[in-house]
Amino acid sequence: MDIFLNPSRQQWAALCRRAEQDNSQIAARVDEIIEMVAREGDAALVALARKIDGVELSALKVSEAEFCEAENKVSEDVKAAIEVAISNITKFHAAQLPHEVSVETQSGVRCIQRPVAIQKVGLYIPGGTAPLFSTVLMLALPAKIAGCREVVLCSPTNKQGKTAAEVLYAAKRCGVTSVYKVGGAQAVAAMAYGTESIPKVNKRFGPGNRYVMLAKQRVSACNTAIDMPAGPSEVMVLADESARAEFVAADLLSQAEHGRDSQAIVVCNSVALAEAVVAEVKRQAAQLSRGEYIYESLEHSRAVVFDEREQMIDFANEYAAEHLIVSMQNEWDVVDKITAAGSIFVGNYSPESAGDYASGTNHTLPTSSWAHSCSGVNIDSFMRKMTIQELSHDGLQGLAETIVTMANAEGLEAHAAAVTVRMKN
């Protein structure tokens, strides 16, 4: 990790740049997969599992026997941990449920905004190097709380054709409707277009590799909504003399281990603290098992030093981190000035991993500076707002002149006539 001392604002854009992802090499392959699934359905999914993953699938849908087998494999400690996480996630997300709004804007004119659950949602849970069963909790629980009628989950298998036991256990525990043994871009296409086995969904959620992310973007353009744009995971830590270097380093490494493209940045107020954090990162990284991912991630991670507290805050807002940890004196004064972050962790004892697993907030968050304009997944992500209006005769009469005048000014005579015909009668 390089250290940058008081960089000028002209340098900030370069320091806020994420690891570059060139998808040009895989774009054609992703398009081919999407078209194949849309055209051939289940047959394409079986063929792609054989070709890409080396797995021969006899059935796409996870059976009840497989759910039972998975439940027996999951340790009691993990089950207990899942229960704690379920309780906290449920409490926090249930509190977010919106209420209907009903307003009489003028006499005889009633306008309503009604929250309605999205009926069919699809969840993607990666397998690969780390089966993220925690993401099942973060997506399936809000979906059920919101009232989604059908919750479909896709997740890849291992070489033996088995989906991770923890993923299946969490899915069953959270009330997922059905689980399918499909991964990669083909899973995204299956949920977007529907196949003989997998239903088409209205909105798709969940992280994934570059193939999955590109497939999400492709299908969102014409077929099904997605949760948010997404890129590699990232963390920024704001730290001053009240911070502990070993804590900061541990937080940086907890993101670096996600993948080679992940990014970790510490912003602090002294060179001494920056050097201490960098030294701790090196020491702790040597003890971790996912070194191949960590060391590549650290190549595009950095430490930035500012003499002024306000510059630290401004830089954090410019970066718009997925995860922002504030380990500074008077930390809430800092938090109140943050305008762009996916999720904020306040104080020395609020590690990012708390939000990843069990504090209650959602860990599906905007990356790549999308926190400037996007929220993380929440109850609203699984709902839409529908408006309703009711006008009495007197209510329409009171608005008639306004409507007719505006419609005629736009040259839309039929709009005006829809009002005047009612007033004549």
Image: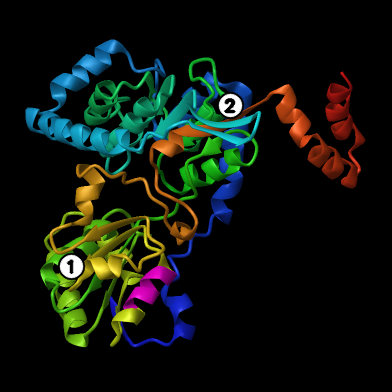
Q: In the rendered view, tell whether residue 275 sits above or below residue 369.
A: below
Which residue is at 54% across, 28% downward?
202
Q: Is residue 205 visible?
A: no
Q: Which residue is mark 2?
A: 193
Residue 349 locus on image (x, y percent): 13, 59
The amino acid type of the residue labelled 1 equals Ala
Query: Which image quarter is the N terminus in?
Result: bottom left
Q: Is residue 26 visible?
A: yes
Relative side of 392 to 137, left or right: right
Which residue is at 58% across, 48% downward?
27
Near-viewer residue (130 or 234):
234
Contact? badges 1 and 2 (CB < 8 Å): no
Secondary structure of residue under mark 2: helix
Query: Which image quarter is the C terminus in?
Result: top right
Q: Residues within 10 Å of mark 1 (few under 14, many from 20)?
A: many
Q: Main secondary structure of the magenta part?
A: helix
The reply to whether the magenta stretch includes residue 313 is yes
The amino acid type of the residue labelled 2 equals Tyr
Residue 213 locus on image (x, y percent): 48, 46
For marks 1 and 2, the one nearer the N-term is: 2
Q: In the rendered view, tell whether residue 226 sits above or below residue 21.
A: above
Instruction: Indicate which disc residue 249 carries.
Output: 1
Near-viewer residue (424 or 377):
424
Residue 135 locus on image (x, y percent): 31, 38
Q: Quadrant of residue 146?
A: top left
Secondary structure of residue under mark 1: helix
The reply to whether the magenta stretch includes residue 256 is no
Q: How many marks?
A: 2
Range of residues picked out in magenta: 312-318
Near-viewer residue (184 or 397):
397
Which residue is at 28% across, 60% downward?
256
Relative side of 98 to 296, left or right: right
